[in-house]
Image (cartoon, rainbow, N blue to C red):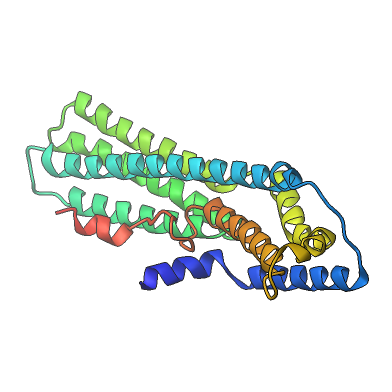
Amino acid sequence: MKRIIRSFSLIINYKTFIITALAVISTYTCFKLGLTAKFPDMLVGVAIVFPVVFSIGSAYTRRETALQRFADFKGHAIAIYYATRDWSASKDHDLPARTKQIIFDMMKLMRDMFKTEHDPEWKQNEANMYQLFSRLSLMTNELRNYGVQSGEISRASQYVSKMIIAFDNMKIIHNYRTPITLRTYSKVFIYIFPIIYGPYFASTVGDYSASLEYVMPVLYSFILVSLDNIQDHLENPFDDVGEDDISIDAEETTQLLD
């Protein structure tokens, strides 16, 4: 029940009530002043709903791609840990523990990076991430000292390479979002449409029973602003705000590595 309430609070927020109130005021004012007009309903679908649904679909596709890349990163990181633990003939070394710590540091740093936009620390955090990749790469070469063959070391190096590619893919998904011009266009029309359609809503007042004349402006406002809120929450799949965001579970992952 709490999750349902939280989901509703993310979709329906203060913006919803502000736009709804403005739409009702606009409808009431137009009705009292006799300003009525029969605007085409299809304008809503063509000018607003279609671009917003396209943006939501695009954001959802990016989220699914980010999930796949995160799974690649996590899977290859675990494979490297198992390599340092199981491939060497001698077990008298601390490679598994050091690898586990690097994986934890990577996932924690990645989680902190992707939760934020481009803050002043972004470049430094990115540099720290590549330093961790460098340490992990050097650690795979240490396997040579414990009897691991060159072919297996090459395979471990490929795991590191695939982790770097997965990280860069997630970074690109974080940095490059739905086209800004399309999002701006959608927001402008979503927020002004219920207001400028006041004459249209006023013209339909006689079609409804008493106390139901404001149902249409309320419904239009709730639907359009809710769609915009959904798109906003899907836009950054790593910010840990929306219900569908990706959780980078650094602590849980490293606890499983024994």
The answer to whether residue 62 is left or right of residue 141 is right
Please provide percent x and percent y for residue 233.
54, 57
The answer to whether residue 234 is left or right of residue 243 is right
Determine the image quadrant of residue 192.
bottom right
Please provide percent x and percent y for residue 199.
85, 61
Q: Quadrant of the N terminus?
A: bottom left
Q: Is residue 113 above or below residue 40?
A: below
Q: Nearer the viewer, residue 117 or 132?
A: 117
Q: Residue at left 24%, top 56%?
A: 254
Determine the image quadrant of residue 165.
top left
Q: Residue at left 63%, top 73%?
A: 14
Q: Is residue 56 above or below residue 31?
A: above
Q: Nearer the viewer, residue 25 or 111?
A: 25
Determine the image quadrant of residue 228.
bottom right
Q: Is residue 153 visible?
A: yes
Q: Residue at left 57%, top 67%?
A: 12
Please provide percent x and percent y for residue 33.
92, 71
Q: Residue at left 31%, top 32%?
A: 157
Please provide percent x and percent y for residue 53.
60, 45
Q: Quadrant of the C terminus?
A: bottom left
Q: Is residue 176 visible?
A: no
Q: How many marks?
A: 0
Q: Is residue 247 above or below residue 154?
A: below
Residue farthest along the top direction in this orientation = 151
